Amino acid sequence: MCGIAGVMTANGRLPDMAIPEVMRDALVHRGPDGQGQLRADDVGMTQTRLAVIDLETGDQPLFDTTGSALVANGEIYNFVELRDTMADEKFTTSSDCEPALKLYRRDGLAFTDSLRGMYALAIHDVSARRLVLARDPFGIKPLYYADTAAGFAFASEPQALIRAGLVEPKIHRSAATELLQLQFSTGRGTIFEGIDRVLPGETMVVAGGKVVERRKRAALPAGGTESWTEAEALEQLERALVDSVSVHQRSDVPYGMFLSGGIDSSVVLALMARLNDRPVRAFTAGFGEASVSDERDHARNVAKADGAEHVEVEFTEQDFRSLLPQIAGVIDDDGRLRGIADLQAGRRGLGRPQGYSVGRGRRRAVRGLWPLSQPDAAVVVGWQGDALARCVPGARRAARRITRLARRHRRQRKYRGSARAYPFAGCPGGRLRRLAAA
């Protein structure tokens, strides 16, 4: 995970780098391993780096021979194959992102058609005097932007745009209601007025500080279904899984995986064990409270069967209380508290956030339920609306009323689950809308 941000002025003048630098500082938690910036013509860009591939020469921005530059958040999985197809090109780094810049020079806006990976990137095209933003087809990596009177700005997180003073922290009411009901907001708009997201698979062109062109890449290939026998289907599935896990493991830092012991993570561990010469590091978060399901026993058996180096971490109620404010403070456009236990497992197991997990999206891939419409910009509002309360007067009061309503519905057996942990889970839509507008 890295952070990118930048601006393009509307008047064509050199930008004041104080604004990109504020955004960079707001994104430092995304990239502790390095920082870089660019100021050229009417564009200023910056990046905070979490180094995974090419630790020595992979710092960004990356430049080509024309002076055009790229900053990116993510990983291009097929960078090795792309380099092989561009044997005549001179590469100055071993970065997985440099082929994207070469492809842009060769293929123009169609350069993303050749990319396989999770990415959000920005290219400053010096010769064309334009800025190009692109996001992977499944929207795994987030990218947000704002059109202002002074020009165009983008960042990996909305809070960076707000902290730089480019947008007022004003909640979009209808999007906030959608967020509280669905735990995510849909479409281009976010819960913040004046901040939009680059759509999954979208390539956007900015010139003169304004968006002038958009291009969309489909997440799935065109064409209908194919008819296979069961044996053929299993062969195709195994080939696809082996290929996917293999390219996900391209890394210059240690890596591991989160193991629940379920079908999805067990499949990933089995494949990693087959593809690695050393035991795979597998992390499992368990829960000490008797009322919470604990899968450590099953995960332990799976790890033993695959010869994994198994690390178990117990996740307590106090861990939840201490970590939740931190997570809510840095994740600001999706209401799902995903991975909070996994985060604790990784921190205690790895010691520092240098390694990374293989197999993101495995459950949806194995079960065939990939949510194409849901961007991956992780969690927002925070427990009982604490993060939302910073921007909207009365939001904390409304959140507490919703929590009480959820508990009443729980007592009436209208839904299952913890009203305290999921304060919006059982509220009927009409009641929720009225409360959210309080």
Image (tube, rainbow, N blue to C red):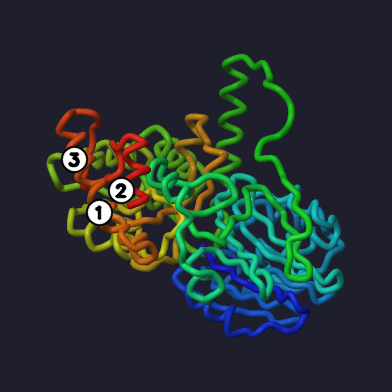
Q: Residue at x 66, y 66 (%)?
A: 95
Report the disc number at residue 313.
Answer: 1
Residue 150: x percent and y percent? 67, 76
* Mark 2 element type: strand
Q: Is 51 drawn above or below residue 35 in the view shown? A: above
Disc number for residue 407: 3
Q: Earlier in the sequence, mark 2 or mark 1?
A: 2
Crowding near the residue tagged with mark 3, few <14, some 14–19, many ≥20 C-alpha atoms within 10 Å: many
Answer whether residue 220 is visible to the viewer in this image: yes
Q: Is residue 228 above or below residue 294?
A: above
Q: Amino acid at mark 3?
A: Arg
Amino acid type assigned to the residue bearing label 2 in the image: Thr
Spatial separation of the CA atoms under disc 2 and disc 3: 30 Å
Determine whether the residue tagged by mark 1 lies in a helix, strand or loop: strand
Q: Secondary structure at mark 3?
A: helix
Query: How many numbered dots are placed on residues in this image?
Result: 3
**Label 1, label 3: how many angstroms apart (C-alpha)?**
30 Å
- Looking at the picture, how far across and down is residue 196, in whole percent? 58, 57
The residues bearing labels 2 and 1 have C-alpha atoms spaced at a distance of: 6 Å
Q: Amino acid at mark 1?
A: Val
